[in-house]
Amino acid sequence: MSAPLLEAANLQLRFGAVRALDGVDIEIFPGEVVAIVGESGSGKSTLLRVLAGNMDADAGTVLYRDAGGEAHDIHALSEAGRRKLMRSDWGFVHQNARDGLRMGISAGGNVGERLMAAGDRNYAHIRAEAADWMARVEMDPARIDEPPKNFSGGMQQRLQIARCLVTNPRLVFMDEPTGGLDVSVQARLLDLIRGLVSQLGLAVFFVTHDIAAARLLAHRIVVMRHGRIVEEGLADRVLDDPRHAYTQLLVSSVLAA
Amino acid sequence: MYVAVKGGDAAISAAHAWLAQRRRGDEALPELSPAQIEEQLGLAVDRVMAEGSCHDRGLAALAIKQARGDLIEAAFLLRAYRNTLSRFAACEPLDTGAMRVQRRISATYKDLPGGQVLGPTFDYTHRLLDFALAAEGLPPAEPEEAEAASATMPRVTELLAREGLMSRDIAGGNETPPDLTREPLPFPTPRPLRLQSLARGDEGFLLGLGYSTQRGYGNAHPFVAELRMGEVEIMLAPSELGFAVSIGDITVTECQMVNQFAGSAHNPPQFTRGYGLAMGHGERRAMAMALVDRALMATEMGEEATAPAQDAEFVLLHADNVEATGFVEHLKLPHHVDFQSELEKLRSIRARWQADRDANPLAEAAALEATI
Amino acid sequence: MNAITPRNAPENAYNFAYLDEATKRMIRRAILKAIAIPGHQIPFGAREMPLPYGWGTGGIQVTAAILGPRDVLKVIDQGADDTTNAVSIRRFFARVANVQTTTRTAEATIIQTRHRIPERPLTEGQVMVFQVPMPEPLFKLEPRLAETRRLHALGDYSLAQVKLYEDIAKQGESGSSYNHPVMVGGRYLMSPSPIPGFDNPKLHNSPALMLFGAGREKKIYAVPPYTSVESLDFEDHPFRPMRAPQHCSACGSATSYLDEIIADDQGGRIFVCSDTDHCAETQGL
């Protein structure tokens, strides 16, 4: 197997007396989907933010290997360097569409912004790409000039995904992308994400408290509790043969639900 | 040939002459002297000194006369004059603890060392028009306690600080304080510059913002620990002397506003203070300033900053009435070049819109239907 | 028209050109920084001037800081030398600096302007001083100065480009007809001050030095001579300078920027050059 796309070692972060991250090691390989599961307060969203360089850890390193094979220490990069990565190689899908979209800008403008940030100055090309990506996330391209508020919650998440993927990133961070949506909408969105991920060969860190979503998408599952990784392994193994008592509890609670 | 905006030279001269005549008003009536304004419109003088950030009652009175009573215009005149003065030194910090108090009240204690001194205040007056003032009246009755209290009066906040219930302000050390009038405001803005900016801010703007913090925009629970007004000594230490000498007394109003603070990981729960200081007698200004000062500490205290009064960029960049009035009033200047390009732009966009409709009459019918 | 006005008797109560020398040095340092980093806004300790904020205090401070006794000053507002604000500022400098003033673009060494660049091409050695109300080109999209400063540092101007995209998507063309943002030297996005888009191309590779002063906002920025200045646009929707398509009814020019004047209450209109000096020159006056 090739080298990891991103690897983090011994991440530490405290908020006052609370250990949000306590010696976390984690890695992801090209094309791999890693689900980070746990209850709220387990540190999973904090971990995602630290991995994406949106938040600094007290200690530890996060290394990213670019397409040329060169490794970059994310937290040693300048803000400009991190932003460049976030515009080109990476994408971030937020739980709340408001955090990931510009609500005052049309759907086309939202998708096109990343292309413009990457230097595309051809209006017709930007517009065609935006329409194409709307179609790929199963939105009606005829609605390209409508603002996000005209779309349902599920559609807004699709738009956020289109906005991330338009520049062909290699690694996408997703923070509870189906949280707060109706169950049927969640299922269709997860289906779409699964299709896109395998089509594009994306690597995805996927934070969720929903074990069923993890089962559907993930190759590998990492279980977090109190800022530590208590168990990790291939998705089927973790879900069908959970070894840690906490994982057993998580898995059984979803089965009971 | 159109000439209305031309010939500006003659128009300006004529306008200035007319203005001078209006300022004087009916010449059958005696002319106001700056001394009369200074004595009888003292609170207007104080406000102009504060917003003009220049302590000179005589010049402030002259500015009010020249501005026909427009106090913002008067503050502007004073500011523009102040700017041409050379700065040769900064005085020592005022010792308001040693103030010769004319008025001193605390809302947090029924009584306290030094006592409550009501002083010359509108508080407790009935707001009934006094028609006796319309006539040339007799001199008012001599007040019983016209002399400033001589006993020193400890500051209420110091009493709380000794008990550890009140955070102490961090001493500034010997550094020369930053000067708002010499350097542009940086963001985030250190507190000394925030206070300078608020001290010369528009009283109405500060009042509205302070009021908003009481009405839930900023979560304040303020108490007036102390409001005091009186004379303080200005001490100056010229470098060639090496020690401070008194160069005179000025009247100031100081307000210390107490606010609760829930505490954080680093700081115990305790009272915090908002501080207000105004040149002359300016209670409303000092109180509003103290409320806004405290609101602006939100970020430093780890409080959630959601209200307008907690947003330093919003507050400090819009508090200055000389800046604000200039920019609002500059809309009176001719803008016809830009307006012309707006006209051409609108014509172009409308032509495009019309062409689209003409090319697609069905859409027009559908749009019409949709509106019915 | 006798263009050059001789010097007046000096006004002794104030220093030459009103500001004290220390303040002028501080402003000149800011100007030098601004020239060294084309298009980048340099904060400076703007002073209160005896003129209201918003009426050219930034431009006046820049002019005062660079003005020397041998300079010949031209002041225009809306392109014209005889509009009230231009008259007022020219009078101010004639009074406090005792310099020669002119209405002729060709004769001026310093031209202070509000909202226009003269039609006559500028030459090496001339300095344009622009009065700037809002120096931040992104302020309508992001009002927070701390944030816009970050965006400039990162060279992140997608916000402005998205705004342009939205304009074209909605109305077929850019929505800004004046104060249209420009990229300076391929690095900094800059407000050209509220000049009509018609004047934007005059900034590109100009032999003259362009200085911009914002008094109330306390910023100075510059475009040095022969610097690339490109209006924000898309390849397939290039920036389009606009003017009224008519001819000047005084000089007949079909290329100069025109003022539209309502001539009667039947909606009759005539068009005349906004640049009064250019119009006079064309008429041979």
Image (spheres, rainbow, N blue to C red):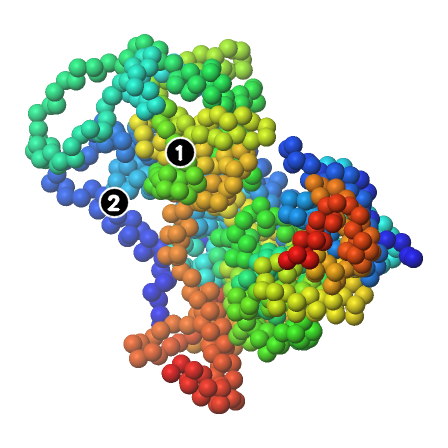
Image location (x, y in percent) of residue C97: 48, 42
Work out which quarter of the rendered image holds the C terminus of chain B and state it. Answer: bottom left
Q: Quadrant of residue C83?
A: bottom left
Examine the rendered structure and indicate whether residue C126 appears above or below residue A141: above
* Residue identified by numbered label 1: B221
Badge 2: few (under 14), some or many (20 or more) residues near its Cα, within 10 Å?
few
Label 2 is placed on what type of residue? Ala
Rendering quarter of residue B307: top left
Of C265 and A168, which appears nearest the observer?
Answer: A168
**Residue C64 drawn above or below residue B43:** below
Q: Chain of mark 1?
A: B
Separation (CA) of disc 2 from disc 1:
49 Å
- Left or right: A41 as drawn, with respect to C95: right
Residue A154, picture quadrant: bottom right
What residue would you read off at disc 2?
B20
Residue at (49% x, 18% y) in the render: B164
Q: Position of residue A201 (x, y in %)?
A: 81, 65
